[in-house]
């Protein structure tokens, strides 16, 4: 991804955007090469984000905790002093980025620029927990 010539960047990925990517761990490993900080924000409860990141072996520098996305982005921006703050999200997230003075990239555009693979519809719709076949 073109980082504008500087790796002095904080990158936040919205959980729903991260779920559309084929290999979230590879995304974070790649992003660490051209960002200073990278993490996940979401409106979902903390345990949902934690379960997803553990399942996909994602090591994040920050997460939203019990806050909403807008409050999280404001908090992250005040704690992580970098030249750029970039928020990767889906369609509805652009307004939140504008309200918090973050640059916005739609997940498909970010994936294209960084060489990240998007998940296929089958893998993107996988349930968080597989149903047990032996359960009545």
Image (spheres, helix red, strand yellow):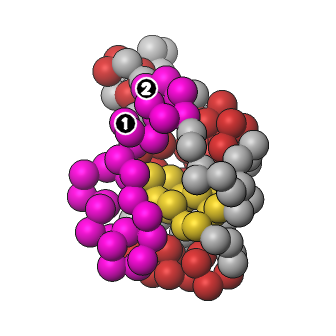
> Residue 132: where, in percent of width, then height?
47, 21
Residue 24 lies, with reference to residue 101, above or below; the image says above
C-alpha separation, residue under disc 2 versus residue under disc 1: 8 Å
* Tag 1 secondary structure: helix
> Residue 135: where, in percent of width, then height?
44, 22
Residue 109 lies, with reference to residue 22, above or below; the image says below
First reached walking from the N terminus: tag 2 or tag 1: 1
* Tag 2 secondary structure: loop
Which numbered tag is attached to residue 13?
A: none
| Residue at image mark 2 | 118
The residue furthest front is: 5
Question: Where's the N terminus, which quadrant?
Answer: top right
Residue 19 lies, with reference to residue 80, above or below; the image says above
Front tag of 2 and 1: 1
> Residue 83: where, in percent of width, then height?
64, 71
Q: Nearer the viewer, residue 83 or 44?
A: 83
The count of marks equals: 2
| Residue at image mark 1 | 108
Q: Nearer the viewer, residue 128 or 114?
A: 114
Look at 65% across and 52% down and name the residue there.
5
Label 2: few (<14), some or many (≥20) within 10 Å? many
Q: Nearer the viewer, residue 1 or 37?
A: 1
> Residue 33: where, in percent of width, then height?
75, 43
Look at 48% across and 35% down and name the residue there.
113
Residue 133 lies, with reference to residue 26, above or below; the image says above
As for residue 106 lying within the magenta part, the answer is yes
Residues at discs 2 and 1 in contact (Cβ within 8 Å):
yes
Instruction: Tell me which segment is drawn in magenta.
Output: 89-118
Look at 26% across and 69% down and name the residue there.
95
- The answer, for residue 44, to whether it is visible in the render is no
Look at 72% across and 38% down and name the residue there.
29
As for residue 70 lying within the magenta part, the answer is no
């Amino acid at each position: 991804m073109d980082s504008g010539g500087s790796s002095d960047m904080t990158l936040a990925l919205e959980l729903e955007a991260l779920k559309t990517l084929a290999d979230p761990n590879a995304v974070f490993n790649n992003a660490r090469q051209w960002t200073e900080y990278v993490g996940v924000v979401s409106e979902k409860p903390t345990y949902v984000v934690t379960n997803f990141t553990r399942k996909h072996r994602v090591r994040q520098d920050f997460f939203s905790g019990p806050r909403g996305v807008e409050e999280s982005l404001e908090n992250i921006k005040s704690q992580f002093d970098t030249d750029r703050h970039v928020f990767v999200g889906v369609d509805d997230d652009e307004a939140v980025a504008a309200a918090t003075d973050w640059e916005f990239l739609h997940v498909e555009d970010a994936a294209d620029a960084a060489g990240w693979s998007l998940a296929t519809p089958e893998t993107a719709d996988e349930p968080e927990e597989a149903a047990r076949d032996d359960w009545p």
